[in-house]
Amino acid sequence: MPEGLRASPRGFDVIGSIALVEFRRNETRMQKKAFACALMEKNHGIRTVLERVSDHEGKYRLPKVKGVGGKRTMETIHVEHGCRFHVRMDKAYFSPRLSTERMRIAGQVKPGEVVGVLGAGVGPFPIILGKKTHAEKIIGFEWNPVACTLMRENIALNRLDDRVSVVQGDARRTYKKFMQACDRIVLALPFNSLELFPCALACLKPNGGRVHFYGFSSKKPGMFSWPLKELKALAYTKRFSIQCKSMRIVRNVASSRVQIALDLKVAPLRMRNH
């Protein structure tokens, strides 16, 4: 088919044998199908092409997806850093775009640590930390029941039942079972990481620890300073101080919006005597 009759999407992710494509609004169904056929012809590992038709929405912040070409399925096995993940594109969130981040955090985890992951999804952070570090225990907090089922399956698939566990339910309540239990917390859910930050602080051991914060920010000067100001204020109310050890842009999510990562050192606030 001539190039002019084929879609030119904004981009796509490959998750296992599925390509998840973000098409432009003016592209026709025929153009989308032509792109799907060309993509599968060029990449023999891709057997299904899905279209992302909406942004994250609903209780579990999932994008709507629909089939465009190839095998009719929403399920696949994705391999990342030697770990295998059973993924359901329509029922549980998964992004391969944080693959580098998962290994970056793994490089900071010390032997014997207890690590909590809030917003663990199908388990990419907990499982990669379990495989690539000598952490004593990794706890995945997740409230999407389908994601929890898949995370348990993925833990077994990667033979990590002895070190990685799942806590199902709203982290704003379930964190109470693990107060002062963790050396390190990963706030992996960027949509409401600020809201969950006090829960993360409560899970840290009495002498503090590390928090890896992921969030969204406008792509402009001050993109790091405003969330850091909010985090410092929240920490102060819980009698903690924080130092930002590193800050980085993880990825662009729109022309004027980025996902950011802040690595925070948390310590008990030493109040002055008056």
Image (cartoon, rainbow, N blue to C red):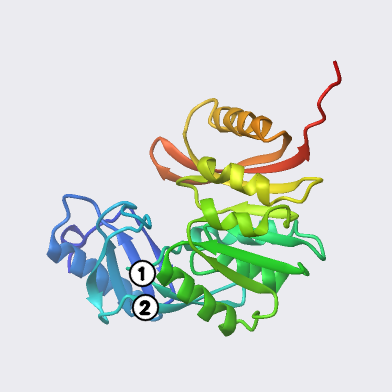
Q: In the image, is residue 16 above or below residue 253?
A: below
How many marks on residues?
A: 2
Using the rendered image of the protein, determine whether residue 261 is visible from the camera's viewpoint. Answer: no
Label 1: few (<14), some (14–19) or many (≥20) C-alpha neighbours in 10 Å: many
Which quadrant of the figure has residue 72? bottom left
Pointer 2: residues within 10 angstroms few (<14), some, or many (20+)? some
Q: Position of residue 7 (x, y in %)?
A: 22, 59
Q: Position of residue 49 (x, y in %)?
A: 29, 71
For the C terminus, give its image quadrant: top right
Secondary structure under tag 2 reads strand
Q: Residue at x 77, y 69 (%)?
A: 136
Residues at marks 2 and 1 touching, judged by CB atoms closer than 8 Å: yes
At which x and y percent is residue 36? Answer: 26, 70
Camera-nearest residue between 13 and 64: 64
How far separated are the C-alphas under marks 2 and 1?
6 Å
Query: Is residue 168 visible from the viewing direction of this image?
Result: yes
What numbered label is drawn on residue 202? none
Residue in the image at 73% along x and 48% along y: 210
> For the residue marked with disc 2, what is the amino acid?
Glu
**Image spot of residue 90 (x, y percent):** 32, 68
The N terminus: image quadrant? bottom left
Establish if 68 lies above or below 200.
below
Q: Which residue is mark 1?
A: 89
Residue 200 falls left or right of residue 63: right
The tag earlier along the polypeptide, 2 or 1, is 2
Label 1 element class:
loop
In-front residue for pair 196/45: 196
The dot on residue 75 is 2
Q: Where is residue 18, by image quadrant?
A: bottom left
